[in-house]
Image: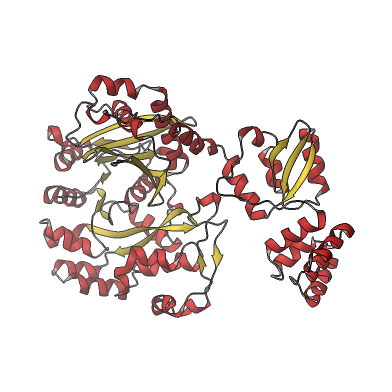
Amino acid sequence: MNASQLGKMLITSAPLGKILLAAGKLTQEQLGRALEIQHTTKHLLGEILIAQNMAKTEDIVWALALQLNIPVFKMEEDFRLEPEEIGLIPVAIARRYCLFPMKKNGESALTLVMSDPLNSEALATVRSLTQLDIHRTVGTKEQIQTVIDKFYRQDAHIERSLEDIVKLEAPGAEAGLAEANEEQLLVQANDAPVVRFVNLLLMQAVRDHASDIHLEPGEKGANIRLRIDGILHEITPPPKHLYHGIVTRIKILSVMDIAERRLPLDGRFKFKVDQHEVDVRVSSLPEVYGEKLVLRILDKQALIVDMRDIGFDEDMLQNFQRILRLPHGIVLLTGPTGSGKTTTLYSALNYLKSPEKNIQTVEDPVEYLVPGVNQMPIKPKIGLDFASALRAILRQDPNIIMIGEIRDADTADIAMRASLTGHLVLSTLHTNDATSAFSRLKDIGVQPYLIAATIKLVIAQRLVRVLCRECKQPYPLEPEQLLPVTRERADAGTWTFYRSVGCARCRRTGFRGRKGIFEFLEVTEPLRKMIFDGTDVSTIRQKARDEGMQTLFANGLNKIKLGLTTVAEVIKVSELDQV
């Protein structure tokens, strides 16, 4: 279509369908079919064309702009809404009509970005709210929802505030800070920009559900990363001249020695966000360009205590709860650091707690406080380790004991003898799979007869990221990607597989949150005999699988079938199971 034809269409306000038809974006047959659907459903023609895959969203937006002689919204990388613009229209109205105010034009007019610029109800509502004339601009639903999600959310100001602090950096301010003395650091740690940066950083970490904050010094500047759903994400770093002050501020909060910058240090502090308390564990490490800090965020409200939310299949959950109701024995959770063992342990304690039971824990350190449970931290510096703490606990008439981790023969021996004398013991062990727990216990010096007599259940655990419900999309797997799945599940060819896309709600990652996948090994009588006889782990593992044990990979396939995660995520954490 040439410029003259387009001009005529603008003058005559041609229907949307004719504009798309003339531009070659639509066929006459498609238009006829869409009009038939519109006659029945009364839906907008543009929505029908998109839903039926007859036209692209961008084409509909272009045609609307042409039809109404209004601009098309283009979202540049540096686009942002200012607070005064956000304040013009409440978020409920913005979401309901899929629009947002882009800017005021003088005192009497407002530019409004809309997905449906023909919606007279939306226009009347905004005019009534703002008392301004409306200049329309058309944009896609996806663009508008992204802007609303990014700038209307309560904590949207945090990242912008961090960026504003960075702009405070003055030329030459970095000089001499590496040699700053204690008095200078104390002064800087209490400067308004430093205090504000630390406060905003902590708020952002909690609201983004980060598990850790990494502050890393470099030659030309500092770097800050948040670990969200197991993956590190860079955020706005501080100016170089503020870095030492920020480190000192955090060390003061953590009651750490600010004068000691040559040795690793540990500390802890608490703060409040939205009326709830958050614990922070701090670790410092001397690096070439200064101290690196890692802050572990322990948000009590973020702790999952409902076992159904962790990721157990229904049958697995019922079996787990049945074993937890046993009067004695040992339940072990295995996996690497960061695999969710602690969350599962606390969820089990929450399930078990009762006024009729004395539950005692010994932990390093106590990460979350559980009402109704007696919790004790170990203190190695004064000789209070797991073994000595356990000896004392056994004199406290416990019904259930939770040990943070079995690390040595003394702790394992006491735990097993406690289970033999009528106690239920819960603990963790660092192994790659469930059956390796038996060889690990042998390696640290536990006798096979004790292992066979006491272990009731071993659960190996990993975490997989969950696909964002807002933006995940179905897609076909390539044959080579499907092969490891069909080897385990013959019906996998009929499943719908999804991939991550990325949107504002998931920070463009395509994932929001994590779920556990599990290897659930209940020690039956045949397995108990094999452990007692010293049978090798691979034979025990094969016997467990013959009895119905799902491997981590097989259990992860259940999450894939439900559309919760991707094949790549499951393979990443359970590749040993495909051998």
Location of residue 382 in the rendering, given as x and y in whole percent from the top left corner: 13, 32
Q: Is 90 left, or right, of 36 in this rendering?
A: left
Nearer the observer, 10 or 42: 10
Q: Identify the residue at horizontal 80%, vertical 70% (top origin).
A: 22
Q: Picture coordinates of residue 390 (x, y %)? A: 18, 41
Locate the N terminus and report the quarter of the image it occupies: bottom right
Above or below residue 354? Residue 25 is below
Residue occupying image coordinates x 80% and y 35%: 128
Q: Residue at x 42, y 59 (%)?
A: 312
Q: Is residue 492 left or right of residue 144?
A: left
Q: Name the side, left or right, on which 533 lies relative to 523.
A: left
Q: Quadrant of the C terminus?
A: bottom left
Is 225 in front, or is 373?
225
Q: Quadrant of residue 102?
A: top right
Q: How many marks?
A: 0
Residue 41 visible at all: no
Question: x%, y% of residue 449?
Answer: 13, 62
